[in-house]
Image: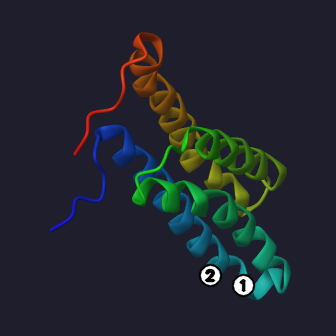
């Protein structure tokens, strides 16, 4: 059985991206009747921001830049749509910020020492 996440930081990125996608789906379902076609935009932008984080993490690639970008997009989208159901995007946005900071902090010792990653 293959492990999904190799570290707690990768697990945090998966949880943050998955939480964003779950919130987007729930908001889309709730807003579907009232929002019409805008529901695709309302739910789609956070999904498009979080999906690369999830894909990169599950493929064991570096995802710091994607995580920062997703955090900025999700929080900005939560603030832009904050008077409505978009307010719910702020919680996964904060988790994405924490995941981005943890990703950079987790990569820092290797970058400072110049040590190569261990071989498999």
Task: Determine the image quadrant of residue 71.
Answer: top right
The reply to whether the C-beta atoms of the residues labelled 1 and 2 are less than 8 Å apart is yes
Q: Which residue is drawn at the image coordinates 37% and 38% (left, top)?
A: 9
Query: Looking at the picture, does residue 99 appear above or below residue 88?
Result: above
Residue 32's mark?
A: 1
Most foreground residue, 93 or 62: 62
Q: How is the image coloured?
A: rainbow
Q: Which residue is drawn at the image coordinates 26% and 34% (left, top)?
A: 118
Residue at the spot of label 2: 29
Q: Which residue is drawn at the image coordinates 77% and 78% (left, top)?
A: 39
In this rendering, position of residue 41 left or right of residue 69: right
The percent position of residue 97, horizontal first and vertical second, equals 57, 35
The percent position of residue 34, horizontal first and vertical second, equals 79, 82
Q: Which residue is drawn at the image coordinates 56% and 38% (left, top)?
A: 64
In this rendering, position of residue 83 left or right of residue 65: right
The percent position of residue 96, horizontal first and vertical second, equals 55, 43
Query: Looking at the picture, does residue 41 appear above or below residue 69?
Result: below
The percent position of residue 15, horizontal first and vertical second, equals 41, 53
Most foreground residue, 108 or 32: 108
Residues packed near mark 1 inside 10 Å, few (<14), some (14 to 19) or many (20 plus): some
Residues packed near mark 2 inside 10 Å, few (<14), some (14 to 19) or many (20 plus): few
């Amino acid at each position: 059985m293959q492990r999904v996440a190799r570290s707690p930081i990768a697990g945090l990125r998966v949880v943050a991206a998955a939480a964003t996608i779950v919130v987007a789906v729930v908001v889309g379902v709730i807003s579907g009747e009232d929002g019409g076609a805008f529901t695709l935009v309302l739910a789609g932008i956070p999904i498009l921001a979080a999906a690369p984080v999830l894909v990169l993490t599950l493929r064991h690639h570096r995802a710091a830049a994607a995580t920062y970008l997703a955090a900025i997009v999700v929080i900005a989208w939560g603030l832009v749509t904050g008077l409505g159901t978009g307010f719910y995007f702020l919680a996964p946005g904060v988790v994405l910020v924490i995941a981005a900071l943890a990703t950079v902090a987790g990569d820092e010792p290797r970058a400072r020492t110049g040590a190569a990653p261990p071989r498999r």
